[in-house]
Image (tube, helix red, strand yellow):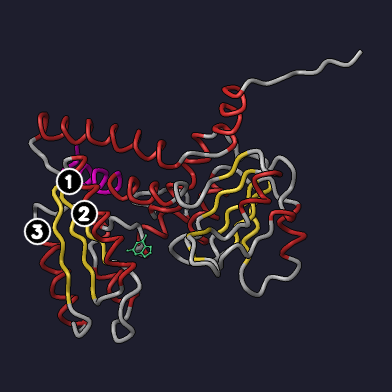
């Protein structure tokens, strides 16, 4: 005997909402929790977490990110200070501002928006930020702590990716995870975090051969290569989880990720959309890191 199950429209929308990981809603819930934590910190210890965001130059995309970060701070009750510097700023001038922010007792987190103009050495700037105030988790001390399994402040986008996996009920232990992209901001730290959750991790990059075959074998795919829809939907294993960190424009100028979503969504069990997936999580995690830094500094 065969049984036909007819699903109502509401059942179908439920299925879809479970398949498509709603980063916007998950980030909103996180911000609400943080707003409560910030209120309690103020009441119980008289501490208002403070974040300084520094932007050098006129890159329009970076300008949008910085404004969004500042707006999100205000929403959860974090004090925010914006420092917008001209493209002509010297490395010495930027180092001097960082010294001032390192010594400012009202500032607990410092973020210098990347990329920096080419006349400023990125590593020098990242190392100059006090490791305790490193809201990005990029300082070699914090990266080293992550690598050695004793994490302190951790990079925001990878933290967001891990939070999305957890929210979708994905268990990493024993799974084959593939990370495409080896940047210090996303690829390397997220690979270490997945390893920390006992996944078997393959870290791929632009010189990787047989990428398609490697992706086809993976249970968890983290796409962070920065190339519009480079990862084809047909490469995704049936039932895999796909987290798309990409934020690109396709040939028609439409926002899209690194994964060919329209095809991948047919094969994946869970997938993040672009926009509305990883993007909102990065800012939520930046706020969380600022609160964590305030707690570390004040030992509360
Ligand atoms: N540029 C792109 N992503 C990031 C980020 O997470 N932090 C900083 N500081 N710059 C970025």
Q: Which residue is farthest right?
A: 1
Q: Which residue is disc 1 drawn over?
A: 74
Q: Position of residue 32 (x, y in %)?
A: 28, 33
Residue at the image position 16 percent from the left and 41 percent from the top: 77
For mark 1, give the secondary structure: helix
Mark whose residue sits in front, 1 or 3: 1
Q: Residues within 10 Å of mark 2 (few under 14, many from 20)?
A: many
Q: Is residue 182 visible?
A: no
CB atoms of marks 1 and 3 within 8 Å: no
Q: Earlier in the sequence, mark 2 or mark 3?
A: 2
For mark 2, give the secondary structure: helix
Q: Which residue is disc 3 drawn over?
A: 104
Q: Give the side of residue 239 with respect to residue 251, left or right.
A: right
Q: Which residue is disc 2 drawn over?
A: 70
What is the spatial separation of the Cα atoms under label 2 and label 3, in whole angstroms?
18 Å
Q: Is residue 13 visible?
A: yes
CB atoms of marks 2 and 3 within 8 Å: no
Q: Which residues are magenta?
A: 288-300
Q: Position of residue 103 (x, y in %)?
A: 10, 61
Q: Position of residue 81 (x, y in %)?
A: 13, 58
Q: Position of residue 75 (x, y in %)?
A: 20, 42
Q: Main secondary structure of the magenta part?
A: helix
Q: Nearer the viewer, residue 166 or 70?
A: 70
Q: Nearer the viewer, residue 262 or 85?
A: 262
Residue at the image position 64 percent from the left and 55 percent from the top: 178
What is the spatial separation of the Cα atoms under label 1 and label 2, in whole angstroms?
7 Å
CB atoms of marks 1 and 2 within 8 Å: yes
């Amino acid at each position: 005997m065969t049984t036909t199950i007819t699903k109502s429209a509401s059942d179908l929308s439920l299925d879809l909402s479970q398949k498509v990981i709603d980063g916007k809603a998950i980030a909103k819930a996180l911000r609400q929790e943080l707003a409560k934590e910030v209120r309690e910190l103020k009441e119980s210890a008289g501490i208002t977490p403070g974040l300084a965001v520094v932007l050098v130059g006129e890159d329009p995309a970076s300008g949008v990110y910085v404004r969004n970060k500042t707006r999100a701070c205000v929403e959860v009750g974090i004090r925010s200070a914006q420092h917008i510097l001209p493209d002509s700023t010297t490395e010495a001038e930027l180092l001097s501002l960082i010294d001032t922010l390192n010594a400012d007792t009202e500032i607990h987190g410092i973020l210098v928006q990347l990329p920096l103009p080419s006349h400023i050495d990125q590593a020098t700037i990242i190392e100059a930020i006090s490791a305790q105030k490193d809201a990005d988790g990029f300082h070699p001390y914090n990266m080293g702590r992550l690598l050695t399994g004793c994490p302190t402040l951790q990079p925001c986008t990878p933290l967001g990716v891990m939070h999305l996996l957890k929210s979708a009920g994905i268990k990493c232990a024993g799974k084959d995870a593939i990370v495409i992209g080896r940047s210090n901001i996303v690829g390397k730290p997220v690979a270490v975090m997945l390893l920390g959750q006992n996944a078997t991790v393959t870290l791929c990059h632009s010189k990787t051969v047989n990428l398609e075959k490697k992706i086809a074998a993976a249970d968890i795919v983290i796409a962070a290569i920065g190339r519009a829809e480079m990862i084809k939907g047909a490469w995704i294993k049936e039932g895999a989880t796909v987290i798309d960190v990409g934020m690109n424009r396709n040939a028609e100028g439409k926002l899209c990720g690194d994964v060919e979503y329209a095809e991948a969504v047919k094969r994946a069990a869970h997938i993040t959309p672009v926009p509305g997936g990883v993007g909102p999580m990065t800012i939520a995690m930046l706020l969380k890191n600022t609160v964590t830094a305030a707690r570390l500094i004040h030992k509360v």
